[in-house]
Amino acid sequence: MDESTGSQELGRLAETAAYDHLSRASQVYFWRDPQGNEVDIVLPSRRGPIPIEVKYQSSIYKSDAKGLVRFCEVHNCDRAFLVTKDRQGSMKVGEVAIKMFPLWRLLLST
C-alpha cells in the first residue's frame, strides 16, 4: 500500500469513528447536493442543523470547507465544525464561522 492510499484509508476510518461516536448520542445524517458538495455528518439541533466535516489531515485550507459553506448557504446557518488530524482553532469562510478541532478531542467528548 502506498502512502496516498494509506492516508485515504485513515481518512475513511476517521470519518467512520466520528460518525459512530456522534450517532450514539443523536440521530445523524450525511448531506450531498446535486452539484456534489457534501458534508460528512449533520447533527440536528433546536437552533438548526449542525454540519461537521472530517478532514483527517494536518494542513487545512479554506477549500476543505467548501461543502460546509454550501450546506450553510442552503440551510441558512452560520456555524460549522471541521474535525482534523491535529489542528484546532477557527477560520471564517464567507459568512460561516468554522471551528476546527482534532478527532481525539471529539472522541473524548460525551
Image (spheres, rainbow, N blue to C red):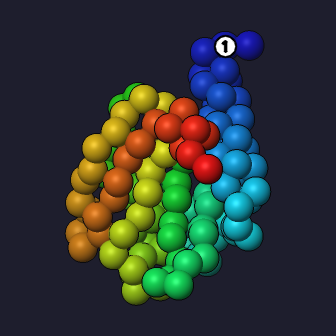
Question: Residue at position x 55%, y 78% from top?
Answer: 45
Judge left or right: residue 66 versus residue 23.
left
* Tag count: 1
Under mark 1, the amino acid is Asp
In the rendering, at what x and y percent does residue 21 appear?
70, 48
In the image, 82: left or right of 110? left
Quadrant position of residue 73: bottom left
User: In the rendered image of this protein, does residue 44 appear above or below residue 36?
Assistant: below
User: Where, by quadrant of the figure, is residue 98 drawn?
Assistant: bottom left
Image coords of residue 91 (percent x, y): 25, 53
Q: Which residue is mark 1?
A: 2
Above or below, comparing residue 23 to residue 105 in the picture: below
Q: Could you tell me which residue is drawn at 60 percent across and 68 percent down? A: 42
- In this view of the protein, which residue sits in the foreground, 89 or 74? 89
Label 1 CA crowd tier, 10 Å (few <14, some 14–19, many 20+): few
Query: Considering depth in this image, is 65 or 2 the residue closer to the camera?
Result: 65
Using the rendered image of the protein, determine whether residue 12 is visible from the camera's viewpoint. no
Name the spot of residue 75 as percent of width and height, x first. Answer: 47, 85
In the image, what residue occupies the spot 24% across and 73% down? Answer: 95
Q: Residue at x 61, y 50 (%)?
A: 110
Where in the figure is residue 44, as x and y percent of width and height?
A: 60, 76
* Element assignment for label 1: loop
Give the quadrant of the N terminus.
top right
- Residue 93 appears in the picture as rendered: yes
